[in-house]
Image: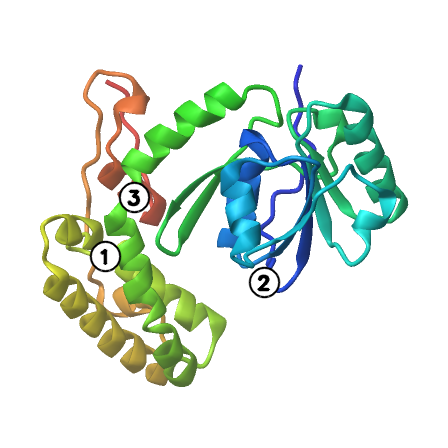
Amino acid sequence: MLESNFYMSALNLTNRRALVVGAGNVALEKIEGLLACNASVRVVAPEALDEVSDLAASGSLEWRRRRYRSSDWDGCWLAIAATADTETNIRVFEDGEARQKLVNVVDVPPLCSFILPAIVRTGPIAIAISTAGASPALAKRMKGEIGALFGRDYAELATLLNEERGWAKRELPGYRDRKVFFESIVAGAPDPIQLLRQGDRDGVRGLITRAKRRAWAEARAGQTPREQRESTGKGFVSLVGAGPGDPGLLTVAGSRRLSRADVIIYDRL
């Protein structure tokens, strides 16, 4: 049985040097990903694709046009080995381990202190998909399906929410107040994602404005939305179902209502 023991995280590579050993098609993919994250890239390879040499000529990366040496690690924070030479790949891994650095040998999980998941990236949203090295093909399929599900509308909502972070920090004193504020928008009614899919950006801004007014008043009164509902006796009921079918047919909206519920009454058909 496969088990994933990897600790999933996101790395800030801005102004950090990354070493890439190899300059073929696989290496180019890794190089482009590193540059997109503002890493300083050092490439070591006797020969390179035209795309890699063009990047070097433009000053986008450093290219050491020779075979790998242990000293290529100097000043580097992590390394990716993407060569067809097993001996070189092993040397890169062992040198990195000796320096207590992060190393990834492409498609060789035993020679990796970190792995590179498939990434769905839309605006500020990045979703990582990992199969712990078991099946990159499956990760690729999942990337396509997840990318289709969480598209530009989610990225646009993330951008709008980010614009309110400054206000929330100034006006809402506690972490819980800010958490409730943002959740009231994301899980609000009408659904902000549906509004964006309909092109109603003003509708989302109106939803945010109303949430700000409520959050500000509740923070001053020392009440959360739930406490306010309990004090007024007002609430709401949602009927959620998937018919007689599989629970997997439950809609996204239905799942969202279940996650917000204080009480759930279940009746098996």
Q: Is residue 242 above or below residue 66?
A: above
Density class for disc 1 (Cα within 10 Å; few <14, some 14-19, many ≥20) is: some
In contact (CB < 8 Å): disc 3 and disc 1: no
Q: Quadrant of residue 59?
A: bottom right
**Which is more toward the observer, 211 or 144?**
144
Q: Is residue 1 above or below residue 36?
A: above
**Which is more toward the observer, 214 or 239?**
214
**Quarter of the C terminus within the rendering:** top left
Q: CA distance from mark 1 to mark 2?
A: 35 Å
In contact (CB < 8 Å): disc 1 and disc 2: no
**Which is more toward the observer, 103 or 46?**
46
Density class for disc 3 (Cα within 10 Å; few <14, some 14-19, many ≥20) is: few
**Quarter of the N terminus within the rendering:** top right
Return the residue at label 1: 188
**Residue that appears at 85% across and 49% down:** 71
Q: How far from the left and from the top, in percent, is residue 42? A: 67, 51
Q: How far from the left and from the top, in percent, is residue 11? A: 61, 54
Which numbered circle lies on residue 256? 3
Which badge, 3 or 1, comes first in the chain's sequence?
1
Q: CA distance from mark 3 to mark 2?
A: 36 Å
Which badge, 3 or 2, comes first in the chain's sequence?
2
Question: Regarding mark 1 in the picture, which secondary structure is present there?
Answer: loop
